[in-house]
Amino acid sequence: MKNQYKIAGMTCASCAMSIESYIKEQDGIYNVAVNYPNQSIALDYDTSKVSIKTIEEKIKQIGYTLVIGE
Ligand code: 9UX
C-alpha cells in the first residue's frame, strides 16, 4: 500500500535521513521517502506484514510523530 502522511518533530534535514534509514530496514517496508521541507513521509508497505499503527510506533520510538488521524 502506498500512502503519504505528515510527520512532526523534524528540525533538520538529517532527521529525515535517520527516519528513512530506520524505517527502511523494518519488516514489510518496500519504500520510504521522507520530505523534510514538506514535513511528510511517503510509505510503500505490505499491509499483511506491517500496520500503519506499528510504523507509527516505530517512528515514535525514535522521537518523531506520524500523523495518521484516528
Ligand atoms: Mo538534526 Mo534531527 O542535527 O533529530 S538530525 S535535529
Image: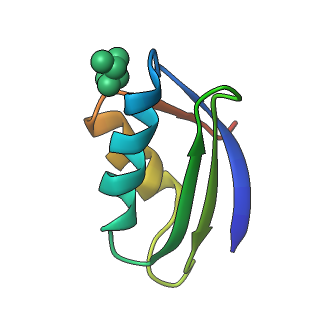
Q: Is residue 24 above or below residue 36?
A: below
Q: Which residue shows up at 39% across the image and 64% down it?
A: 24
Rendered location of residue 15, percent (x, y): 39, 30
Direction from residue 36 to residue 24 in the image, left or right: left
* Closest to the observer, 5 or 20: 20
Task: Tell which residue pokes out farthest to the top in this image.
Answer: 11
Q: Which residue shows up at 57% across the image and 54% down it?
A: 33
Location of ligand 1 given as a quarter of the image = top left
Q: In this view, does 51 lie above or below 37?
A: below
Task: Tell which residue pokes out farthest to the bottom in this image.
Answer: 48
Task: Tell which residue pokes out farthest to the front in this image.
Answer: 13
Q: Which residue shows up at 57% across the image and 77% down it?
A: 47
* Closest to the observer, 32 or 55: 32
Q: Which residue shows up at 38% across the image and 31% down it?
A: 14
Direction from residue 7 to residue 65 in the image, left or right: left
Rendered location of residue 70, percent (x, y): 68, 39
Direction from residue 64 to residue 33 in the image, left or right: right
Q: Is residue 30 above or below residue 14?
A: below
